[in-house]
Amino acid sequence: MMVETPQSKAISIRQLAMTFESTEGEKVKALHPIDLEISAGQFVALVGPSGCGKSTILNILAGFLTPTQGRARVGGEPIIKPSIDRGVVFQDYALFPWLNIIDNVAFGLERMGVRKKQRNEIAAEYLATVGLQEFERKKPSELSGGMKQRAAIARVFATDPSIILMDEPFGALDALTRRFLQHQLLEIWQKHKKTIIFVTHSVQEAVYLADRVLVMTARPGQIKLDNPIDLRYPRDFTSKGFRDHEKLIYDVLDEELAKTFDLESKGRLVD
Amino acid sequence: MALIRVVLPYLYAAIAIIAVWQGVVTLTSAHVAILPPPALAAQTFIELVASGEIFIHIRASLSRVIAAWGLSALVAVPLGLAMGRWRRFENIVDPVVELFRPISPLAWIPLAILWFGISETGKIFIIFVATFFPILLNTVSGVKGVDKVLIRAGQVLGCEDEWSLFRKVILPAAMPTIIVGFRIAFGTGWAAIIAAELVAAQSGLGYLIADGMEILRSDLVMVGMAVIGVLGVLIDSVFRIISNRYDWGT
């Protein structure tokens, strides 16, 4: 049984810019004014050199950061503060260590006012989707990294948000676990068709998962390449189409990486 | 069997202490009023238990500490939560706290007697001072130590106002540290109550010791000290069990 779906929503970003002030009072431009339209149900991957502002965009969309200029809207509504309608999957899982796995997954449902019996049913269902039905009563500390992230994914889908923001969710996992989770994520996404923004360092991961890859420039971040991936799922890493997309993205990235290293060697990049 | 494993080291320690004690008595052939042999202290202990007197003293000391410690928790936990969460509030309150903190609770005894006489209030006041800072400081550091990412997770999972975030995320996340504060505070409170009762009481383990000294009954003093030590260990182990429950292993 699923909670009534508010369906997925489109994201609209207009002239969005962000400037941070360092502790010494120095202004660091993290995002150049960005315009971006993402339609409902799209799976968008954000790649770029470190410090390019990928996470800044994600944090603005989540409502953790207020942009210094411009505005982001979800489903036409301006983003003002964090909301349960915009789910986040964090790199370091962010499970609540004092709650067992099923209570973690049911946390958001409880806040939504879903009754205990029903929220446990929903949580159990999503845990089964990610293959964790045996671990409902375990504490997060008893699970491996991959299992924790699966629980975190179950937790975010359980509340049925209209967009899901993922900040390098598989970055800390080993290659095999990562592959497995990519697969599971695609399955869930194809079933629920949520709008997903997925930040990653891995070009391969981006091309494998997303139906649109955005490549960002070195700081101040801008979108340099907007690359739709029209390959059919499940995708084959070794196919020519796959590698063509990878090459296109790498070419743009290489240019940007050169600039990043240049900035770093001049000591101007503060991360 | 786990119990035996926990108790056994303490039993060995007790035997060793008694052996040394007896050794010193035998070697120095000290006067019984200066250093009574363990056997005499044991006899006095049995007498005090039989008459029920010891329980009156234990209850008097314990109830003072519990009352003051509870009161402390009621004030220090909310204050600490606020200080840990709001930087500006902390900046205002912290200097006040820091100025009072180095003053030993024992230094408050004269004022406590002046203000409250030798009533219960005076003793509770002293223990309040002794237990307040450990709870406060641990609460503050517990709240500050809450992983920022857990707070963000709470915010995007429906804790949209500060109050629900406090209740559902910050407080449970800070709980293990706060419980350590409770435990330390009880220890300092337990040490301070004896001092407070030494000078201003008619009951309690501290009073038992002070009284024993006045009537030259060092066996009473020794019994009082032993009871304080054993009870201290027992209470601390209760806290340890509680804090283990809150240890979710990170």
Image (tube, helix red, strand yellow):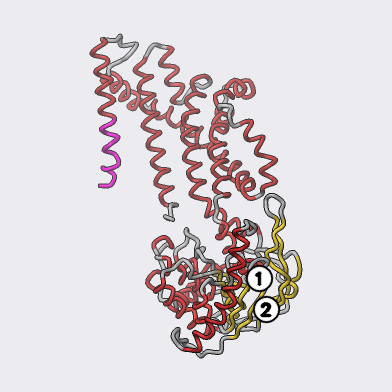
Q: Mark 2 sits on what residue?
A: A11
For residue B208, which numbered disc appears in the image? none
Left/right of residue B69 with respect to residue B30 in the rendered view: right
Left/right of residue A130 with respect to residue A110 in the rendered view: left
Residue B8 is a magenta residue = yes
| Labelled pair 2, 1 in contact (Cβ < 8 Å) | yes
> In front here: A238 or A95?
A238
Crowd rating for badge 1 (residues with CA inside 10 Å; few <14, some 14–19, many 20+): many
Q: Residue at x 28, y 20 (%)?
A: B21
Element under disc 1: helix
Q: Chain of mark 1?
A: A
Return the x and y of residue B189 as percentages of the image width and height: 50, 32
Which corner quadrant holds the C terminus of chain B? bottom left
Query: What's under tag 1, amino acid-wise?
Result: Leu
Return the x and y of residue B32 as percentages of the image width and height: 30, 11
Q: Main secondary structure of the magenta part?
A: helix
> In front here: B224 or A48?
A48
Residue A267: image quadrant is: bottom right
Earlier sequence position, callout 2 versus callout 1: 2
Return the x and y of residue A151 as percentages of the image width and height: 46, 70
Query: What's under tag 2, amino acid-wise?
Result: Ile
Q: Residue at x 71, y 69 (%)?
A: A32
Magenta segment, which residues? Answer: B1-13
Say if residue A82 shows up in the picture. Answer: no
Say if residue A77 shows up in the picture. Answer: yes
Element under disc 2: strand
Left/right of residue A220 with respect to residue B151 in the rendered view: right
Q: Mark 1 sits on what residue?
A: A61
